[in-house]
Every structure is written in structure tokens, then in C-alpha cells.
Image (cartoon, rainbow, N blue to C red):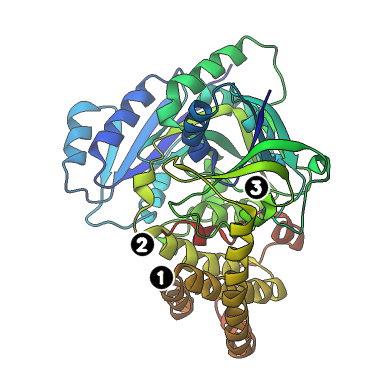
Amino acid sequence: MNYPLVSIVTICWNRKAEIRESLSRIREIDYPNLEVIVVDNASADGTPEVIEAEFFEVKLIKMFKNIGIEAYNIGFKNAKGEYIVILDDDSFPAKDSITKMVDKFSNDTKLGVVAFDVRNFYNYDEVKKVEADEADLVKKETAAVAENYLMAFNGAGAGVRRELLEKVGFYPEEFFLYWNEQDTAFRILDQGYRVQFFSDVVAYHKYSPKNRSSWRAPFYYTRNSFWLIWKNYPLLLALKLTIRQIYYCLYYSLEQKTFIYLKAMGAAFAGLSRLQGRRKPVANNIACNLRIPFNSPFTFFH
Amino acid sequence: MKEVLIIRSVSFQQLDLNLAAIKSQYPEWRLSVLTHEHGLLLAQKYQAIDRVYVYPFKEGFSYRRPVKELREKVFDTVIIPVANLSGAGFLNVLFFSLTLKCKSRIICNLVSELRPVGPWQIICHSVINKVWSLIALLLTLILAIPVLLLLPFGLKRIEKTR
């Protein structure tokens, strides 16, 4: 087998323990040609010092302030691999996932993204056992596809062709947080590539209930849902979805007795000019078939 | 053997956590999952799950889109996982659960607390929310006028030129 260079790119912000764990796990990956890039979003908890002291093989890029997902783009631009693996600071791929990912890319030139099956780190041992059992079985189809719709991917574990990611303009920096994967998926699909989940390509994520207690998720998910619509959908569909999203914001504000959705909606309209030059409607079949759960922003509060 | 159906209304990462609590609550019961088509292979990886049913629609779970395959099936319990503490924002899934025949319904929240929810509770919740829905609809109609008039110009303005 050929081993093209694979760049693992992740960002972090005040997650010293998590990034230490992830980088330790990344060291265990059984792929011989890896580059690891961490972009630190100006952590104040000693995260960069830990990386420098303990992970000499990691290319650390330090930001002067927290710039959100824009930091990923700094990492992507510095990546030299043929493929990029995108991770969260608290996620890491299973030992054999990179090899499997490269194999899938090599066998399918129109495969743009290998979406990992992102599982919960706290069930690591249990899932790992399932993986080991599966390895004993004969090779079977592992592409998790739906016949009538398309899927985006999860940024806690995904492989993408570097040239393709560059062509579509990397992650949407203006989003700051959340739904950047969906926006990128639109543009990758529009280039004629596929995004596909594989059940045998696994990543583990420290998904914790504590992570979702703040206002950040409902605010950025809601604001970015409007921007996602305005950037990617053909006009009529964009208008229809905008009206539906306004309805959702009003309805869920009343249901959950909060102003966060209205605030986010206001921020979306007020920030329309920040999307200057970024609207490029995708083909109708992609707009209609990519599964975007537009009511999910309203499930993170309370 | 008694049978539990888990509606996969949250991410697999949350379900990974919830499943441990569900298994300990129902140790000897047969567990099944209902998931969208893209989740079939991923759900089949659970050792604790006996059977995976496919929700044959692209859209989210809805009372208006029941599963034909499950029309006659009777479950002992249907579990509805929610991605927060209260279940807010999941009325559509709760309402969908009314299309399933079962003896009890349980909400499983973000921190894996299990609590029963009766059909009348769901219906009452739904009636209250109909009021919010009507108010939201009226306000949306008012806001729709300037949005439909002005947004097309805004979208034209932000279009990529080359």
C-alpha cells in the first residue's frame, strides 16, 4: 500500500487535558506518514506550553486571540498532506482509521469527504471491542448511505482531500462556531464530489453534557442557520427556508421563554453584509437533497 | 421477552451515553432502535441492540410521517432521548411517539435521567404549543412582508461575482 502524507488538523482553546489526551492517542495511530498541526486559539491555561513540552512532533501555531473556526483555516493552509483529517481538540481517530480512510480515497476519486463514525470517548473500550470483533469478519460494505438524501459530516472526525478543501475556500470563517461543516459540505457536493459516512472509520469524541450548557450553541447554530441558507440555497428556496426559520425562532422563543433565538436572528440579518461575495447557490438537487436539520438549533437550550 | 424501542432523536455520541443508562434500567429487555437510513449501519454496531428499524424519510420524526412497518407492532416501552435537560424542542418526536403502540413512553435526557411521559401529557403540551404556534405564525406573516420584499436584493448583493 502507498502511504501518502496525511495532515491531522485540530484547534484548541483552554482544553489542556483534552488536547493532551487526544495527542497521546494520535501517537498510537498505525499510519506511517502523518503530520499533526494544532492551532491554539490563544489559550490561557498553559495548553501551548504542554504541547511544546510533551509533543515535539506537533506543529503548533499560536493565535493572538480566539478566532474560532478561522483557526482551522490557518491549520489547513499550513497542511502539506494529500488528505486532511479534521478533529476537535477532544477527539481522535481510532488506530486504524487513517489507513482505512486513505484506502477509501484511493479507491474512489469522486469521494470528497470520508465522514468518520464519531463515537463517545466514554464508551471507548466498548466500541473498541466491537471494532476488534468486526475486524475478524469478512470484508463487508461499510458506507452508511441513504438512498434519498445526502449527508454532511461531523467536524470531530472527517477526512477530506486537501486540494478540494482549498478549492472550496476551506471553512466559512464568518461562522465563528458551528455549522461550518454543513456549509463546507454544500460546496464540496457542488464540486461533484461525495460526502460519505463509513461505519468502520471511527473517531472518538469526549462528548459531554457539560459542553452544551451555555448560550453559545443556540446562538451560533441559529444565526448560522440563516447564513447557511443565504449562502447556499437558490433564491426561492432561500426565501422559503428563511421564512420557516423566522417562524422557528419565534415559536421556540415562546416555547422556551428565551430571547436567545431572536437575538441570533437579529444578528443574522444585521450581519448580512459579512457574507459579501460568499453567496453561491448550489445546484437544486443538492439544495433539496442535503439533509440539514434546521430545527436542531432549538434543542440545545434548557 | 419485553421490548424497548429507542427513537434515535439525538446524535450517536449522546446515544452512546444514554444506552448505558437504558441498559441498566432494562437489563433483561430486548432493545431496538428506530433511526434514519444513514444511521442504520452505525446503529447496528451496538452490541446491546437487537434490531434496527429504519425511519424511511429524510425529514425529522413527525406525527404526519408514521412508520408503516411499525403500525401493528406493540412495544412495552418507547424511549425518546432528548439533547437537553427538559425535552424542550422535541415535541415533534414526542408527538411522533404517539403513532407507535406501546405501554409506556420514557424521556431520556442529556444526562440520562429517565422519566415517564403519558400520551395525555404530550397532547396537553401540544395544545399549549398550538397557541405559541399561532402567535408565531401571525408574527411570521407580518415579518414575512419586508423579508420577502427586501431579502432578494440583499442576497443579490452578497452573491459571488466570479
Could you tell me which chain the residue with mark 2 belongs to? A
Q: Give the x, y percent position of residue A59.
A: 30, 36
Specify the amino acid type for callout 3: Met
The reply to whether dot 2 and dot 1 touch (C-beta < 8 Å) is yes
Is A196 in front, or is A167? A196
State which quarter of the image contains the C terminus of chain B.
bottom right
Residue shown at 55% from the left, 18% from the top: A131
A273 lies left or right of A168: left
Could you tell me which chain the residue with mark 1 belongs to? A
A35 lies left or right of B3: left
Is A102 in front, or is A252? A252
Q: Nearer the viewer, mark 3 or mark 2?
A: 2
* Local crowd size for mark 2, using a 10 Å CA cut-off: few (<14), some (14–19), many (≥20): few
Q: Which mark is residue A260?
A: 1
B14 lies left or right of A66: right
State which quarter of the image contains the N terminus of chain B.
top right
- In the picture, residue A20 is in which quadrant? top left
Q: Give the x, y percent position of residue A223.
A: 47, 68
Q: Which label's residue is closer to the chain start, 3 or 2?
A: 3
The reply to whether dot 3 and dot 2 touch (C-beta < 8 Å) is no
